[in-house]
Amino acid sequence: MSAMLIDPTKLDPADAYRLMISVIVPRPIAWVSTQSADGVLNAAPFSYFQALGSNPPMLMVAIGNRRSGEPKDTRLNIEATGEFVVNIVGGENGQAMVDTSIGHPYGVSEFEEVGLTPVPSEIVKPPRIGESRVAMECKLDRVLEIAGSGVCIGKIVMFHIADDVVDADGLVDPEKLKPLGRIGGKQYVPFLGTTTLSARPPQSQN
C-alpha cells in the first residue's frame, strides 16, 4: 500500500500537533479541577493524559501554554497549591466539558460560567466536579518541562467512584460510565461497547 512520509522536523509545531491528535486516538480526557491561591475555582479538559504507575498510583497531565505563550490557569493553580482533581468525562457531560475549554481570563471560574457543581474533596482543597461520576484527588509530585508543555505528575490520594458505575467486582464498568475519548480536531468518540480479546497461546517448541 502507498503511504505518506512526513518529516516532523519540517512541520510547524501547530501542524505537528494537529497531525498527532489525529493519529494518537482515542485519548482519555482529564477534566481537571483546580483552585487558585485566592480560592477561585477552575475546570479545564486535557487529552494529553495517562496513568504512570500503580505503586503508588500516579498519573500525568501535560498542559501546554496559551497561544500567547503564557501558562494556562490549570498549571498556574497546580504549581501554586500542589493539588488538583482529575474528573473523568462521561457522555452525558461532554458538552459541559467542551464549554470549559474556552479560554476565559485568569480569575474567571469555569464552575460558575458553565454551571458546574463543586463538591468538596476529602483530602485536597480543589473540589470535584459533581457532574462527573469518577474523580481522582491528586497531590503534585513534580512538573517536567517537555516539548513545550508542563507535564504535571500527580500522586492519587483518593478515588471517588459513583455507585451506579461499579460492577460486581468493585471496578468501574465502562458500559455504565460511557467515557468520552478525544480524537482529531473537534471530534470526540463515544463509548460504544467493549470487545474482549484473548492472547494467542504460546507455540509449541516441539
Image (cartoon, grey):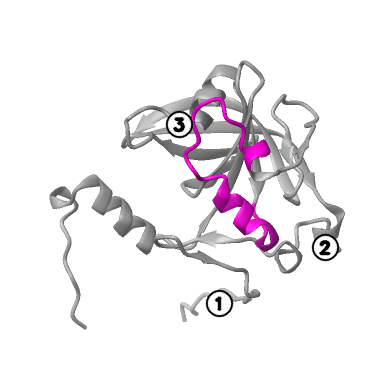
* Residue 72 - label: 3
Q: What element carries label 1?
A: loop
| Magenta stretch, residue numbers | 89-113
Residue at image position (47%, 64%) is 187
Choose between 108 and 92: the one closer to the eye. 108
Q: Distance between the residues labelled 1 and 3?
A: 48 Å
Q: Do the residues labelled 2 and 3 touch (CB within 8 Å)?
A: no
> 77 or 176: nearer the eye?
77
Q: What residue type is labelled 3?
A: Lys
Single out the mark in the foreground, 1 or 3.
Answer: 3
Q: Would you place residue 193 above or below residue 39 in this image?
A: below
Q: Which residue is drawn at 74% across and 49% down?
A: 131
Taking the spot 50% from the left edge, 29% from the top edge, the residue there is 73
Residue 82 screen position, x and y as percent: 59, 21
Residue placed furthest toward the left: 10
Read off the residue under disc 1.
201
Residue type indicated by callout 1: Pro
Q: Which of marks 2 and 3 is in front?
A: 3
Q: In which quarter of the image is residue 65?
A: top left
| Residue 56 highlighted magenta (yes or no) | no
Earlier in the chain: of badge 1 and badge 3, it is 3
Earlier in the chain: of badge 2 and badge 3, it is 3
Q: Where is residue 53 in the image (x, y as percent from the top left)?
A: 58, 41
Q: How many marks?
A: 3
